[in-house]
Amino acid sequence: MNDRKHAIESLGQMLRIRRLEERCAELYTQTKIRGFLHLCNGEEAVSVGVVQSLGPEDAIVATYREHGHALVRGISARAIMAELYGKQEGCSRGRGGSMHLFDAKTRFYGGNAIVGGGMPIAVGLALADKMRRLARVTCCFFGDGAVAEGEFHECLNLAALWRLPVLFVCENNLYAMGTRLDLAQSTTDVAKKAAAYAMAAEAVDGMDVLAVEASAQRAVASIRAGAGPFFLECKTYRFRAHSMYDPELYRNKAEVEEWKKRDPISNLVKSLQISEADLAPMERDIAQELDDAIGCAEAGTWEPVSDLERFVYSEGRRP
Amino acid sequence: MITLTYRDALRESIREAMRKDERVFLMGEDVGRYGGCFAVSKGLLEEFGPERIRDTPMSESAFVGAGIGAALGGMKPIVEIMTVNFSLLALDQIMNNAATFLHMSGGQFNVPVVIRMATGGGRQVAAQHSHSLEGWFAHIPGIRVLAPATLEDARGMLATALDDPDPVLIFENASLYNLKGQLPEHAGAVDIDRARVRRSGRDVTMITYGAMLWRCFEAAEALAKDGVEAEVIDLRTLRPLDDATFLDSIRRTHRALIVDEAWRSGGISAEVSARIQEGAFYDLDGPVERLCGAEVPTPYPKHLEDASFPQAAAIVAAAQSMVPVHG
């Protein structure tokens, strides 16, 4: 059955993300990864469901919690892990780290670490496509925190006004860092805000990869048909802290446990009736992939200090 | 030769760029139907249509960021921010995105966007509309900062900026839009890397840019009547700063006077001064002098506003105090 096969593939992608994030947490405690590290455990269904709905010609603008989007998009675990190590084999030459994964080949425009700051970039990429008559979609991820930023409103208005091919994906995990949505928003119905800009909008269970994918496919089809931007609110939850510095004083454990019952991975395993024996080879392949990635990152090299000032400006420009 | 204004020169440069390259388009507040707040883009909507002369909502961050995104997407956008005062609403996009993408992505994503804006005071428009923040922007690695002061540069800098693979900010001093003069009919691209000696003189080097260039000319003429010959240097590009040109001049005149309408503390004048100490300390016959904007929010009434910016008389007095009396 194709549907079942696809669901299992989606499960595999979510597992890849989950295991990657778990390895990242370990490597962080070993101080192999430094700086800020924002993990997306719990939110895998959004990355997988949305990114799988895009074509290779489309673009992605993501946030600082973007390991999952990058991995599903096709940036190799090796290139991601080397980047987290700060090695020059990383997808951004090691210069960006966890928050700034970039990849020209897959049209992955960051890894943007100013909340809301990637949104105008996405609008501009879509404007370029529209002006160049290219039927491409720009997918813009952001969290519920961005909804409070002025850029959110400016960008929704501009994209709707100019009917630009942008897929806005709000990963609503209920907390802007440590501030709960209802303490930050006068109205917590995020999709409704998009509707106010006369934009097609939908809210979906972000813990259900198949539901996310179905919505994202509808959205992408609508955008590609020329109907203008589409807003997808994915209601999700992060199982881990905001970052590795976060003591999680703002939410109680019971709430986290309640959401863990909605784990997109274990629930899909259950609904597909996948046995431990079926899962084992999948887990083995992922472990191998990650072992290999970590090995490559360990063996990776530091960019020479003499290159520090390279790429402040483009090379090869006349003096 | 043709007679035209600074405004006309800018318009011609935009028109020429848009005719040459389909990827070039202009967007900003009131650039289309209104014709541009300072009438720079007047008539361009009629010639190029609303796709390429795009009126934007008052959303500086969104449309400046959209310019950055469109540049990443293969276009060559010219983004007009009505004045530098409003650029603060787009500072995040300029500083965190335009200036960082190439380096942060390990050389993968350059941003060929051009952002133009009016700058400067002296028009009695008070504290929120009189800023000169080009020196601030010149603090940021990853962008180029241009300040055309002449018709030649108003006509020629844009073409070179559009050819540049990286973000270029162009600061047009609003008091220059009506400046009138002559240019060759086929005036075109100019370099955006070097400062220029605009007036030669042996006694003192005046280092300036933008509207203050003309104030320095005025002062230099007055000084010449007293036998003091000022060399006047137009910086033209505030980042990267061409220090070779002013250091070379100071090695000849041994005196440096920096004239900048922006605030003194932490401004571009401070940077120029530091570079002089670093590069020509032993060539100086006296301390580097600076004439800058008074460190106040610019007031509305004319007498107070005049007192806020360097005037020709003050430049003359400063230069005279630096130069020993001639035989």
Image (cartoon, rainbow, N blue to C red):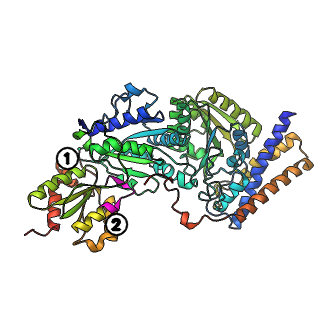
Residue most extreme to the left: B327
Task: Please check the rendered image and state whether residue B240 is part of the magenta-colored stretch, yes or no.
Answer: yes
What residue lies at 42% left-to-right and 54% top-to-bottom? A319
Side of B263 relative to A86 (left or right)? left
Quadrant where the N terminus of chain B lies?
Answer: top left
Q: Secondary structure at mark 1?
A: loop
Closer to the camera in the image, B260 or B220: B220
What residue lies at 43% left-to-right and 56% top-to-bottom? B140
Please name the residue that numbered disc 2 is placed on.
B275
Give a yes or no on whether discs 2 and 1 share a subunit: yes
B308, above or below A185, in the image: below
Chain of the residue that carries numbered disc 2 in the rendered image: B
The residue range painted magenta reads B235-245
Q: Earlier in the sequence, mark 2 or mark 1?
A: 2
Residue B53 shows up from this direction: yes
Q: Secondary structure at mark 2?
A: helix
Closer to the camera in the image, B186 or A192: B186
Check contact, mark 2 vs mark 1: CB within 8 A: no
Closer to the camera in the image, B165 or A204: B165
Task: Please check the rendered image and state whether residue B107 is part of the magenta-colored stretch, yes or no.
Answer: no
Location of residue A66 in the rendering, given as x and y in whole percent from the top left corner: 65, 50
Location of residue B227 in the rendering, given as x and y in whole percent from the top left corner: 10, 61
> Which picture quadrant has residue B197?
bottom left
Amino acid carrying label 2: it is: Arg
The disc placed on residue B190 is none
Location of residue B73 in the rendering, given as x and y in whole percent from the top left corner: 55, 40
Amino acid carrying label 1: it is: Pro
Please name the residue that numbered disc 1 is placed on.
B301
Location of residue B93 in the rendering, given as x and y in whole percent from the top left corner: 48, 47
Residue B265 shows up from this direction: no
Side of A157 relative to B312 (left or right)? right
